[in-house]
Image: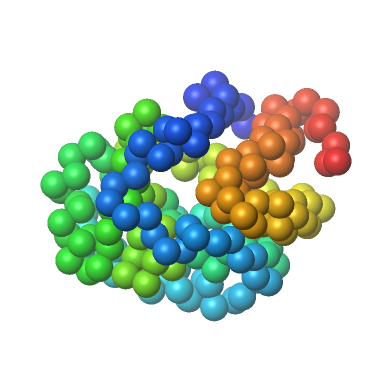
């Protein structure tokens, strides 16, 4: 059984104010509304194409690149936006990677040094969110744990899908609240993941 460091287990959330302050330039048009769609197998192909183009321009700078988020979980309803975690040695030195990504149509939209050095770029069609992290950041570890758990635990996958559909309705007039509103159910599922890893009794799904 695996035990995870406190950096991984103790997740913290940014505030709406912090996220607003992190915005670089104009927000993506995709932020104007939240539309949850049934799972589409084509999402895996879209990830593969996006990852290939990123690898072509960044090459040896890449430590790891992963398809994460709901579009990476077969059967899970999601916003049709591909989330990619890109791990580099140093995310703070933007000159090493942002010009190359801009050359293939990406645009920097978030700079969050307080959140493990996170940067986020959107693809040319604003249907890819490219999350850039330093190698040691704990958040990408949580992303992979959540993805893999949902792939193999249909009860939590369905709970997450139902919660997202409800929150999309509840925040229809304030879509910027949607991502923060998901934190409660994500934390519940992560608690079960960490309990299972440590051998403790798992909290039940609500």
Judge whether 152 appears above or below 112 on screen. below
Front position in the image: 173 or 96: 173
Rendering colour mode: rainbow
Judge whether 137 appears above or below 34 on screen. above
Residue 94, x across and y down, in percent: 19, 44
Instruction: Residue at 69% x, 37% y: name it.
Output: 184
Front position in the image: 148 or 130: 130
Residue 205, x across and y down, in percent: 83, 41
Judge whether 51 appears above or below 64 on screen. below
Instruction: Residue at 68% x, 71% y: name it.
Output: 38
**Dividing the image into 4 quarters, which one contains the N terminus?**
top right
Q: Can residue 59 be seen in this view?
A: no
Q: Can residue 156 be seen in this view?
A: yes
Residue 54, by quadrant, is bottom left
Instruction: Residue at 32% x, 32% y: name it.
Output: 113
Front position in the image: 116 or 144: 116
All told, the count of numbered labels is 0
- View extreme (front): residue: 173
Residue 111, x across and y down, in percent: 31, 41
Judge whether 87 appears above or below 46 on screen. above
Instruction: Residue at 51% x, 55% y: name it.
Output: 68
**Dividing the image into 4 quarters, which one contains the C terminus?**
top right
- View extreme (top): residue: 6
Residue 77, by quadrant, is bottom right
Residue 187, x across and y down, in percent: 67, 35
Q: Is residue 159 left or right of residue 133?
A: right
Q: In this view, does 177 lie to the left or right of 134?
A: right
Front position in the image: 121 or 32: 32
């Amino acid at each position: 059984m695996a035990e995870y460091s406190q950096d991984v287990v103790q997740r913290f959330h940014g505030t709406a104010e912090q996220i607003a302050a992190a915005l670089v330039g104009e927000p993506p048009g995709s932020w104007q509304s939240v539309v949850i769609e049934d799972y589409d197998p084509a999402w895996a192909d879209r990830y593969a194409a996006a990852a290939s183009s990123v690898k072509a321009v960044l090459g040896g700078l890449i430590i790891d690149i992963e398809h994460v988020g709901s579009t990476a979980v077969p059967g899970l309803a999601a916003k049709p936006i591909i989330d990619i975690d890109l791990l580099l040695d140093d995310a703070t030195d933007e000159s090493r990677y942002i010009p190359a990504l801009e050359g293939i149509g990406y645009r920097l939209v978030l700079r969050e040094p307080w959140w493990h050095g996170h940067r986020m770029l959107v693809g040319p069609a604003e249907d890819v969110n490219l999350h850039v992290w330093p190698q040691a950041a704990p958040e990408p570890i949580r992303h992979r744990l959540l993805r893999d758990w949902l792939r193999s635990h249909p009860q939590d996958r369905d709970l997450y899908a139902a919660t997202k559909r409800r929150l999309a309705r509840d925040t229809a007039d304030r879509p910027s609240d949607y991502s923060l509103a998901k934190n409660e159910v994500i934390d519940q599922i992560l608690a079960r993941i960490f309990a299972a890893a440590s051998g403790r009794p798992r909290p039940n799904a609500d």
